[in-house]
Image: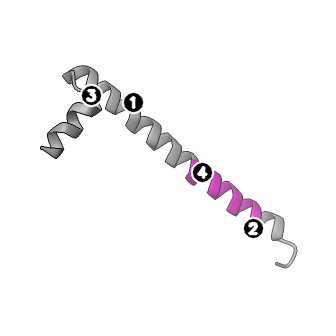
Amino acid sequence: MGGYGLYVWGSYAVTLICIVGEILLISRRYRTLEKQYSLIYGINKEEIKNETTS
């Protein structure tokens, strides 16, 4: 890589860390919104599953 291997692989590592971090933050935010929605409307996951299966 002409002496730039550390820079290239370091850039790949930083990009991968950022992507994984975004995925984790999005999933955490989704769970938080799901909890808030259930508190507001007084429903839980079991009720949602029963509604979709019937």
Pointers 2 and 4 in contact (CB under 8 A)? Answer: no
Pointers 3 and 1 in contact (CB under 8 A)? Answer: no
| SS assignment at label 4 | helix
Mark 2 or 4, closer to the camera: 4
Q: Quadrant of residue 8?
A: bottom right
Pointers 4 and 1 in contact (CB under 8 A)? Answer: no
Mark 3 or 2, closer to the camera: 3
Residue 17 sits inside the magenta stretch: yes
Most common SS among magenta residues = helix
Q: Can you say which quadrant of the picture contains the N terminus?
A: bottom right
Q: Which residue is mark 1?
A: 32
Q: Residue furthest right?
A: 3
Mark 4 or 3, closer to the camera: 3
Distance between mark 3 and mark 2 Cα atoms: 47 Å
What amino acid does circle 3 point to?
A: Asn
What amino acid does circle 1 point to?
A: Thr
Q: Is residue 6 above or below residue 18?
A: below
On residue 8, which mark appears?
2
Q: Which residue is mark 4?
A: 18
| Relative depth, front residue between 48 and 38 | 48
Residue 37 sits inside the magenta stretch: no
What amino acid does circle 2 point to?
A: Val
